[in-house]
Each structure stands twice: as structure tokens, then as C-alpha cells.
Image: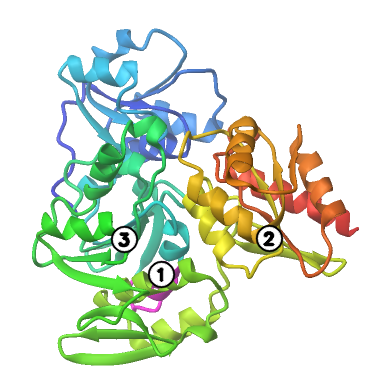
Amino acid sequence: MQGEGDFKMPQEKYVFVYGAGISGCGVAEVLTKNGQKVLLYNDSEKSLPQEFLNLLYSGNGQYICGKNAEDYLRQADLFVVSPGISMRSTLVQKAIAAGIEVIGEVEVAARLYKGKLIAITGTNGKTTTTTLVGEMIKTLPVKTAVGGNIGQALSVEMQGLGKDDWLVAELSSFQLEAVTSLKPDIAAILNVTPDHLDRHGSMEEYAKAKANIFARQTAEDYLILNIDDKIVADFAKTAKATICYISRKKQLEQGVFLADGNFVLAWNGERKTICPIKEMKIFGAHNEENALVAIACAFFAGVAEDKIRAVLTSFEGVEHRLEYVTTLDGVAYYNDSKATNPDSTIKALESFAGHIILLAGGRDKKTDLKDMMALIKTKTDALILMGEAKERFLQAAETAGVQNIHVVDTFDEAVMLAHRLASPPQVVVLSPACSSFDMFENFPHRGRYFKELVRKLEK
């Protein structure tokens, strides 16, 4: 259970919130309603809703853009950093040097929240798994909410939840690197593969951030680990929680796994078949893994097996994750805009038998491309590259022996070319293996634009 205690701070000081995005504005609103004076700072000019600003000002708060932030640090005794801002950034380091406590938005939620918490992380699959778990938890006779790296800020989503209620949180490495008291009742780590190395600097630091999800758990809490992923499995060496393993590849004496085409739960001497894999509407090995973790989370939260089964067999997936768009002239189009790293794109490619027209590229995270390009060589009929990463991706594709590579200048051109090239039994898949920030606001913006272009072709 969270809720180590409310903030007790002298009212003449500010809570300095750095970043006026969803998380920053969300936590600023929560802190203001909690009686704190908030100084919300953004590096560049940004318009915010007047209703929000009125609330901020009503609590003697301020909204400052682009001015000398150091002048305001002297007025603060707590610094809340938004997840999109690195802990290594100049202003954050100056706050630390000034002796100001620096925490993230999720840490604010952890300190204020009094109810029960399920926290889920991993390089890939977080959103699908969190959404699945959220739907399962909703079957309990209590209030529930889902937030974090999905939807609203966690500190906003927890509002109105009591001590017996459940909050399901998707947490990224960016959010986890700035927590100091987070203690989930149930934590889960799906996988850890190279991603965000441009921010964390190394795989060791990236994994260390992920490990923060269970660092303060005790034996009364549950930690769900994917035993098929070596980095994740190794977390058991330092964890103090009760561990439940999941596996796609082997049957376990205790845990959640696949056996004879079924999802199976074995715990405390009991073995139960949840449902056949083929009854799920979402497909692919990665979604089987997501379902295994969701089953474990829901089971330890007290969800009945028939409710778990009902959600698994009715769930149709999340937007931008191998999302079926439409079929044009016998060719199916899939939006996998959420694939922002090579491992996620590999999972998408593995979900199809072959004959893929793949659209890839965007802002380059400098991740290793060797394994992805080896699979592209065997799975794709054409590779269309775009964005800032296109030249490095092209070089890696040619080195791997990929055939039929096309390099384009714009996103629109990529979609039009895919349409011209594709014929049955091929499928067109947008799975970029890159972030979207070279051309779009975020991956949802990219995914929605892809669907818009495809539906224009349909008309």
C-alpha cells in the first residue's frame, strides 16, 4: 500500500514543477488542490487552459516560461521533474546542487496515494498489459483507475480512490528513475531490451531504472518476472518480494505459463487452466507474454478466474499496437506506431507469416539494428525507410542483405508507395523501430496520421 504521508511543507516555499506537459500540469493541479504553492516552469512558451491557470493562481502559484529558472530555485524546497526531462539536465543538476529534493511526478503520487497499487514496466508491451490488467481489475467490487505512462498523470488518476481501491500504473524507465518511496502491492516486469540508451547512457543504467519498480517491496508484496528474459529473471537475485514467474517457453512448477495451447496458472499446489490461447482476439507471441503477466497481476489482486477469462477472450487490443486499420484490394493495413525500438518491431514481424511491406524509420535512438534487419530479410517483401534514421537503417539493411529497399522523403510518400507496391497476400505494417519526434508530436499522432492516410486511400 502507498501513502507514506501527506506533504508537510512550509507554505512560504514553492514546489517547483519542471515541464508543462501532461504529467507536469497534472501534478501541479494535484499539488495545488493539496494546499501547496506550485511554481510551474517550462523552457519554452506554451499556452495552457485558462481554467487550469486560474486554479494555479488561486493557490498563490505561478506559471513561468523561458526565463532564468535558477532565480526561482531559491524559492523552492521540492523539485518535481516531468518524465520527459532527463535527471542529467542542467536545471535538474542545479536543483540537486542547491540541496533541493528532486523527485518525479510518480513519486508525488506514491507519497499521496493511500490505496492498492499494481505497477507494470518493460521495454515493450506495457500499454497492452496495463490495459488488460485494468479491465480485469474493473471486475472487482471497488473503485479502480489506470494511469501513469498511459492516459492521465498517475497523480491525477489516483484522485478519489480510497484505501481498498486499486490503481493500475504503466511506468516507463523515465518515470521510475525519479522515485524514492514507490512500493507497489504488485509489480511486473515484462522484458528489458535496448531502448532509450540516448537518455540512460547504458543498458546497466536503463535496467537499474526499471529495477526501481520493486526496490522497496517486501515479502508481503508480489513481483511478477518474465523468466524467459535473462535480465528480468536476474532481478530475482535482489528482490525481497514474493516472486511469481511467467513463461511462454517452458512449463513451471509454480507461476503462469503456456501448456497444450492453454494459459495455465499454478500456485500453492493448485493448477488451473484459464483459457485456450486461440480464444484471444489479439495475436502474436508478445501478446501471449502480455496475457501471462496480466493473468498473474489479476490473480494476486483477487480477480476471479472466470472474470480473467472473460477479459482475455474479449479484449481487442490497444490503439497503435498492431492495430488493424482496414483491408484495401485484399491487403490488410496495420498501425504499429507504438513500436519505437527494434525489439518491438521484431515482435510485430514475428506476428505475421511473412509477405510484409514494412514502413520504418523516424528519430534514431542509435539502438543496434542487426537482429531486426536479419528478420526483415526473411519476413518482408519490401522495406520503406523514412525520417532522420533512414540513412543508418539503409546501411544496416544493405549489410544484412535485405532486398527491395525504398528510401523516401516524407511520411505521406511512404504510405502511398506501400499502397502501390502491395498486393495479396501481402500486408502493410507501420512499425517504425524509432521514436516519432522528427515528424510528429508523439507516436499516437504518427499512428492517427497513418490511419487517416490509409482511409483516404480507401475512399
Element assignment for label 3 = loop
Q: Report whether 29 appears left or right of 279.
A: left
Q: Amino acid at mark 1?
A: Glu
Going from N to C along the chain, the mark reached first, 1 or 3, is 3
Q: Is residue 363 magenta?
A: no
Residue at 11 percent of width and 54 percent of height: 238
Q: In the figure, is residue 366 to the left or right of 28?
A: right
- Quote the CA–CA distance across marks 2 and 1: 20 Å
Q: Nearer the viewer, residue 367 or 191?
A: 367
Q: Residue 141: percent from the left, percent from the top? A: 34, 78
Q: Based on the displayed image, in which of its 4 quarters is residue 18 positioned?
A: top left
Q: What amino acid is labelled 3 in the image?
A: Asp
Q: Which residues are magenta?
A: 132-142
> Which residue is disc 3 drawn over?
229
| Secondary structure of the residue carrying numbered label 2 | strand
Which of the 4 image quarters holds residue 145? bottom left
Q: Which residue is mark 1?
A: 289
Q: Residue at x 84, y 70 (%)?
A: 330
Q: Nearer the viewer, mark 1 or mark 3?
A: 3
How many C-alpha atoms fall within 10 Å of the one at disc 2: few (<14), some, or many (≥20)? Answer: many
Q: Amino acid at mark 2?
A: Tyr
In the picture, the quarter occupied by the N terminus is bottom left
315 displayed left or right of 382: left
Q: Earlier in the sequence, mark 3 or mark 2?
A: 3
Q: Earlier in the sequence, mark 2 or mark 1?
A: 1
**On the image, which quarter does residue 122 sit in?**
bottom left
Q: What is the x, y in percent for residue 347?
A: 51, 60
CA–CA distance in space, label 3 to label 2:
27 Å
Query: Residue 205, percent across and down?
Result: 26, 37
Q: Which residue is mark 2?
A: 334
Q: How many other residues sit within 10 Å of disc 3, few (<14), some (14-19) or many (≥20)?
A: some
